[in-house]
Image (tube, rainbow, N blue to C red):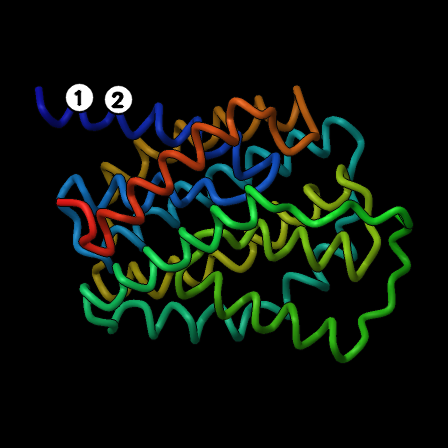
Amino acid sequence: MTEIFYSLLLFVVGAIAAIINVNAGGGSSLTLPTLIFLGLDSATANGTNRIAIIMQSVSSVYAFKQEKYEQFKLSIKLSLITLPGAIIGALIAIKIDDDLFQSILGIVMIGLIITILFPSKKSKIQDDSEDKKITLPLFIAFLITGFYGGFIQVGIGFILMAILNKAMKFGLIYVNMHKVFVVLILTIPALLVFILSGNVNWFWGVSLGLGNAAGGWWATKVSVKKGDRFIKTILVAAIFIMALKLLRILP
């Protein structure tokens, strides 16, 4: 009975997280702490969360394709740049001490709160063309993003949105389209690292992933905006409480 309840809980949390992930980013700040609070160690929670991320990303990429928003040639090019960093990040994540990982995660989530409460102004220049030159600074930015995604994953959507919008000048729809594709590709080798090291709970991962897939598909179909004020308020409150718990400020 407890397992069924946990599975349903993870499905709901996964759906909410996917809606946040597709429209903005930071949904893993709900799923990862939830897995930790259900009893998984940090490495296993990190690996299990990758199952859900992949299921969500596949669903969302498919929905974008249905809506005729795709630039797969560029998406693949950007994704390949992230792969070396993603593998290195995942290898570090499976070896890091639980307490240190949770402290880093808590600090990251507080940083996410700041980006949500004080978002940067939208760029007035928009260029949705696929013919983009990958400069050295962009190459380095995606390489570092891959490392971060392999290591923690939480908030990678915000980082990719900043690069795609501010540096590459994509509008929001194409920002989110490229974002979910890049996250899908960089998460695959990271998940393999966690699987090979035995740091995955498949039952909870699939339960969470089904919610992520449903939420990701729905969010892509219904909206291309970052989410309304109510969702942001709930997200900030949830992240803040979980960050305080992980940092041991709250019991």
Is 51 left, or right, of 115 in this rendering? left
Check the image and name the residue furthest to the left: 1
x, y percent for residue 73: 78, 55
Give the camera-side residue of 172 and 85: 172
User: Which residue is denoted by mark 1 in the rendering?
Assistant: 5
Residue in view at x 34 percent, y 40 percent: 31
Residue located at (60% from left, 73% from top): 143
Three-letter amino acid code of the residue under disc 2: Leu
- Residue lying furthest bottom: 136
SS at circle 1: helix
Is the residue marked by circle 2 packed among few (<14), some (14-19), or many (20+) residues within 10 Å? Answer: some
Residue 208's spot in the image, x, y percent?
33, 34
Task: Find residue 15 and report its horizontal and vertical position in percent.
Answer: 43, 27
Q: Looking at the picture, tell me which residue is in the foreground, 73 or 167.
A: 167
The correct choice, above or below, for 22 with respect to 71 in the image is above
Q: Do labels 2 and 1 touch, CB within 8 Å?
A: yes
* Quarter of the figure with the C terminus: top left
105 shown above or below 38:
below
What's under tag 1, amino acid-wise? Phe
Residue appearing at x 64%, y 28% in the figure: 220
Task: Label 2, secondary structure: give it.
Answer: helix
Q: How many marks?
A: 2
Judged left or right of residue 176, residue 235 is left
- Identify the residue position indicated by label 2 in the image: 8
Q: CA distance from mark 2 to mark 1?
A: 5 Å
The correct choice, above or below, for 203 with respect to 118 in the image is above
